[in-house]
Amino acid sequence: MSRPHQDRLSSLPDEILEHILSYLPTKDAVATSFLTKRWKSQSLWRSQLNLHFNDIHFPDASAFRQFFYSVIDKRDNTLPILSFQLNCRRHGFLYETDLYNAVYAATSQGVENLSIDLFHNPINIMSLPTFVLTTKTLSVLKLKRVKLIMMKYYLPSLKLLHLESVSSYEHINKLLSGCPILQDFEAKDLIVSNLSSSGSDVLSLSNLVRANVSGSPDIKLHWFHNVHHLRIQA
């Protein structure tokens, strides 16, 4: 005789359930509110400190946009956002204001880990909001397929900076100099213009442990004169 089904998951304390949800993509975390009455009434996903948005699960950009704003509006905004990942490689955002709003939602809540990976559109590369580069709480920043317009740059808590297919019309060395405790740096396929060719711009990256540079000939090797582990690829 078969045993009756027991919902052991729902009997767990909220703290454990919230910890489990933190490992799920935000779309799946929101879907748990339809599992049982308890999950629906408490909407534990609204207390999530880690948000991961991926447009691959949506039929078009409009559906993804609607879901994103719904989550941001309903989330408990008295809680911080520790990790914010935005992957828009299938559809991308329709408007640059959407990227601005997405990033602002994270930085205004004290985000520590920010990852942005956008749809590749060589004709219209979206610009990263400039306030990101002065976010004092950031310790991890990963950017793919965005454009940097660097007015001010000071990231006092940043320890990891990864850039891939990023366009910059300013001095990338000035961005690095604004990261005083940077430990890990990666640059892949950067598009940089107006870069100084002077040999005097030696950076004081005294905390840098690892640097990995590939497909970015504009990056100057003498910037990393004191790095512990350096890897260069053409």
Image: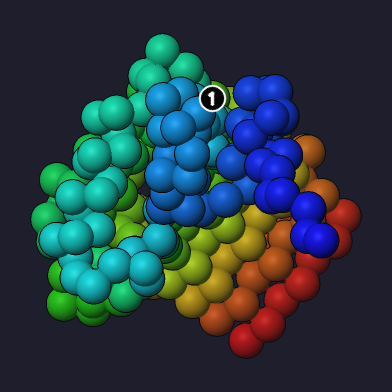
Return the x and y of residue 25 as percentages of the image width and height.
51, 53
The reply to whether residue 130 is in sight is no
Which residue corresponds to the image point at 70% horizontal and 67% vertical from the top-left? Answer: 212
Q: Mark 1 points at which residue?
A: 137
To which quarter of the image does residue 71 belong?
Answer: top left
Colour scheme of this structure image?
rainbow
Residue found at the very far front of the displayed protein: 1
Closer to the camera in the image, 52 or 159: 52
Check the image and report above or below for 123 versus 129. Answer: below
Does residue 202 appear left or right of residue 54 in this picture? right
Which quadrant is home to the C terminus?
Answer: bottom right
Closer to the camera in the image, 222 or 92: 92
Does residue 166 appear left or right of residue 64 in this picture? right
Which residue corresponds to the image point at 68% horizontal and 82% vertical from the top-left? Answer: 233
Which quadrant is home to the N terminus?
Answer: bottom right
Check the image and report above or below for 178 versus 228. Answer: above
